[in-house]
Image: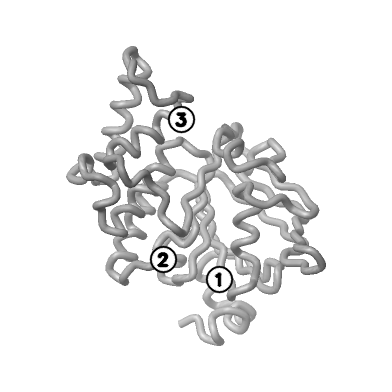
Amino acid sequence: MTSGQGPVLVLEDVAKRFGPIEVLTGINLTLSRGEKRALIGPNGAGKSTLFNLVSGRFAPSSGVIRLGEKRIDGMPAHQLNRMGLSRSFQITQVFGGMSLYENIYMAVMSRHGKRWSLLRSGRVWRDIAEQTRELIDYAQLTSLADRQASTLAYSEQRALEICMTVATGPDLILLDEPTSGMSRVEAANMVAFIGRMTEGRTLLMVEHDMDVVFGLADTISVLSQGQILATGTPAAIRDDPRVQDAYLGGSAH
């Protein structure tokens, strides 16, 4: 886990090339503790690549990435998870054959460094069970606790996955298009859910739905042609003519 009061995430002059193609160049980005940052930009801008660099799927071609005070560029995803970085994917990833309760229980177990065991006695296992119930209650998913994950509606599975992401106790949460495939009503409900579940936590997300972005983000970074075009508050980004030309079609309203 990261510690101290400094930035949670820092990217310094990060670049990524695939063969002769330079997808990202000169990326500098800093996330403060508790900040909610959205990455937006047109298709092909490099959002997914940047997201994958931070989450450990890719290593940068050059530059430095730090989680807290620790350099993490090139580290694998499972190691980053143990260091306090947790990612929710665009395609829902839950254990379909297990109940909602069991899915979250497994996530809480990982925070305590425990593996599944038939012999689950002692204080730590009572704490895991108590924290699982508290998280389910806080997420307002109590009525679904005993339901098999595969039988849940799509939006409910997404809520479960985000709940599992939070359950690992991360310092930094990465969300990849958390409302993808949802109706307008479902997306609005998910915005409220994410806001509640990530309160006080540091969040970095990629999202195309601008209503979701403006509803969740404290700060927005706009990528264009592999570089950060602008960073600012939602109001500043909405009114930035460069952003309107590059991404919002000439009118952010």
Q: Which residue is mark 1?
A: 236
Q: Could you tell me which residue is drawn at 51 percent across and 85 percent down?
A: 251
Q: Could you tell me which residue is drawn at 51 percent across and 57 percent down?
A: 205
Nearer mark to the viewer, of 2 and 1: 2
Residue 138 in the image, given as x and y percentages of width and height: 28, 41
- Is 103 displayed left or right of 213 in the figure? left
Residue type pointed to by label 2: Ser
Q: Quadrant of residue 125?
A: top left
- Is 99 displayed left or right of 22 in the figure? left
Residue 15 in the image, given as x and y percentages of width and height: 76, 59
Task: Mark 1 or mark 3: name the one nearer the start of the chain.
Answer: 3
Q: Are marks 2 and 1 in contact (CB under 8 Å)?
A: no
CA gap between label 2 and label 1 equals 25 Å
Residue type pointed to by label 3: Arg
Q: Which residue is mark 3?
A: 111
Residue 78 in the image, given as x and y percentages of width and height: 57, 38
Q: Is residue 219 above or below residue 81?
A: below
CA gap between label 1 and label 3 equals 38 Å
5, 210: nearer the viewer: 210
Residue 249 in the image, given as x and y percentages of width and height: 54, 85
SS at circle 2: loop
Circle 3 Cα neighbour tier, 10 Å, few/some/many (<14 / 14–19 / ≥20)? some
Q: Is residue 58 above or below residue 22?
A: above
Circle 1 Cα neighbour tier, 10 Å, few/some/many (<14 / 14–19 / ≥20)? some
SS at circle 1: helix
Nearer mark to the viewer, of 1 and 3: 3
Q: Which residue is mark 2?
A: 180
Q: Could you tell me which residue is drawn at 38 percent across and 68 percent down?
A: 181
Residue type pointed to by label 1: Ala
219, 189: nearer the viewer: 189
Task: Mark 2 or mark 3: name the one nearer the start of the chain.
Answer: 3
